[in-house]
Image: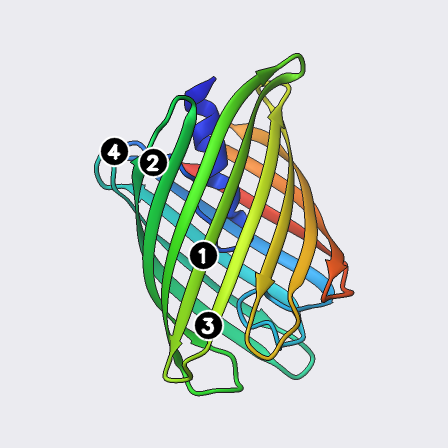
Amino acid sequence: MRTPIAGLLIALAATEATAGAWPRPKGETFVSLATRQSTGARTLIAAVQDIRSYNSIYVEHGLTDRLTVGLDAGQGRGPDEQVAAGLVFARLPIWSPGDHKVAADLGFGLLEDGVDAVQTRVRSGLSWGRGFESRWGGGWLGMEASYEYRVPSGDSAVKADFTAGLKPTDRWMTILQLQTGAYPDSDPIARLAPSVVRRIGPRTHLQAGGLAPLAGDDAWGATLALWFTF
């Protein structure tokens, strides 16, 4: 189960900027097209904004057996506000003790939130993951944390996501993610993002889920994403 679990964990970036601890196989490309609709959630990118709709694209490509490169970009809109963000990144595994996988990544990008001037983003991240077997099928645990510095504002942003997933059959997966973030001019945010994933083709999956606030935010939402691997 290790290979399919690795691919699924990497694909968890469908709705936010996250990266799994396993490298994408050389020559393989993963694409996620996602949309999130909510009652008025902060985006976990520009947390001061009241964003009701957020559409994103996330791409990963295995440049070598160890080096994965990618793109994470999105655009959000609210009643009176909007945000656009993009970031390119590279990720390398750095430690593999037993069944555990640890990887580091570095990314550069831009942010336009309508509040400050266009910001240059420099982001470093660390990911951990571990697959397991259970009586209900294969599963995985993961953590993705990042620190982002923005120029010229000098602001910084910290984000950490914690994920548990289970694959009871070849066609279905269940995912529970805790998303947290601390952003400039904003209280820390924590929310739950449960979802189910259905395989609808040999290399295509459909993900449907929700967003439930825990702290720093009172908005509820729903997400929908298509995953492609080729």
Observer-nearest of 198 and 40: 40
> Residue 24 bears which disc, if any?
2
Identify the residue at image location x=51%, y=79%. 113
Task: From the image, tell me which residue sits under label 1.
Answer: 146
- Rounded to the nearest angstrom, the CA distance separating label 3 from label 1 is 11 Å
**Sooner in the amino-acid sequence: mark 3 or mark 1:** 1
Amino acid found under the numbered disc labelled 2: Arg
Amino acid found under the numbered disc labelled 4: Lys
Task: From the image, tell me which residue sits under label 3.
Answer: 156
2 vs 1, front mark: 1
User: In the displayed structure, would residue 71 be above or below residue 80?
Assistant: above
- Rounded to the nearest angstrom, the CA distance separating label 1 from label 4 is 25 Å
Task: From the image, tell me which residue sits under label 4.
Answer: 26
Circle 1 crowding by C-alpha within 10 Å: few under 14, some 14–19, many from 20 = many
**Sooner in the amino-acid sequence: mark 4 or mark 3:** 4
**Sooner in the amino-acid sequence: mark 1 or mark 4:** 4
Q: Residue furthest front?
A: 97
